[in-house]
Amino acid sequence: MEWFQIKQVSQQTGLSAQLIRKWEQRYKAVNPRRLNNRYREYSASDVERLKSIKRLVDDGISVRRAVDLVRERESHALARVDGHPSAAPYTTEMLSESGTMRADGNELMDESLAKLIEAGERGWVSMIDEALSLSFAEYGLSVVIDTLILPFLRNIGELWESGRWSEDQEHLSSLATRDFIVRRMRDLPDPPSHAPTLLCSCIPGERHDIMLNIAMLEARRFGWFTLFLGPDPAPNALFSAVHRLQPNVVLLSVSTNHTSPQTPPRDKWFRELDVFATHRPDTRFLIGGPQPIVESYLTDLSHVHAVYHLASFYRMLTAPQESIPSTR
């Protein structure tokens, strides 16, 4: 076994020696061996564990929670080696047979995507959460969202639309993914009192809210305060919330043209929203979703703007504060 002194560990992980000692003493992140001269020596697994913890902390997770997540991942890995029954027999056949999208060409992420698809196929909700949690502990949040969760959501939609998946398979897989995202939000520290506010909501009649949850998760990581009206709000709920809460940015979601008799005509609702927005110059109104659907509603609007990609939304979140309306 190869051993490293703390200076070498610092160089490999990008952590200061002082921080490594703090994580060791306060959170039991690693357990180096002590030599007769009382110097510490760290194993290769200690180094990899510290790298994994650092990735999670860089994503905004608390050190204590990051240590727990990495240890949980290691426990799952040991369980598989020992033949623990929780180690379900995943295969990669689903990925090729379904004709769905691959993750990003990374072999490990492709394998994780295949696990997610098979877990969704068989209704193994706990296995969806396990696959996402293990990848999260290994690669960090940003990588998992971009190269695993988003491809998985696209696969879910394609499999359901093609008739290869039933509605219950689509619902269970989507909700398991949503629950994972919501739990990651709970892991993040509260934003400062002066943080800008993002208000997210589906439009009336719209129930698909996973992308809004992803947007809120990223906003929280960038230090924003987030509020969520949820799926299918009452027609006047958004107007009331904006009037009372005065958010800096409002992000709306629409993913389908299907409406119900109980909801107001969408063209009329958007026109009312545009008029409302003219009287709220300190709030920026955005709507996200598939480009053809979004554009069909925004043709005659001047104060509600489209956002088609998470990347463009992220750029707005990280823009200089003076370029974002401030209401707090």
Image: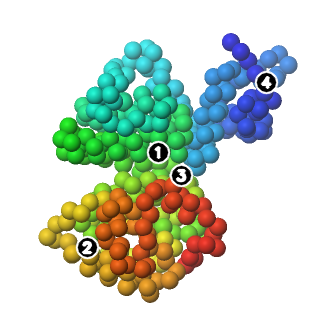
Q: Label 3, secondary structure: give it.
A: loop
Q: Residue at x 48, y 64 (%)?
A: 226
- Who comes first in sequence, dot 4 or dot 2? 4
Q: Is residue 57 left or right of residue 105?
A: right
> Hey, what amino acid is under mark 2?
Arg
Distance from Cα at disc 4 to Cα at disc 2: 64 Å
Quadrant of the image occupied by residue 1: top right
Q: Which mark is residue 145?
A: 1
**Label at residue 323:** none
Asked whether the residues under the numbered discs 1 and 2 touch, taking CB atoms below 8 Å apart as contact, a structural biologist would say no
Residue 72 appears in view: no
Q: Is residue 34 above or below residue 309?
A: above
Q: Which mark is residue 266?
A: 2
Where residue 94 sits: x, y (%)?
Answer: 30, 28
- Front position among marks 4 and 1: 1
- The residue wearing badge 3 is 188
Q: In the picture shown, does residue 240 fall above or below 177?
A: below
Mark pair 1, 2: CA separation: 30 Å
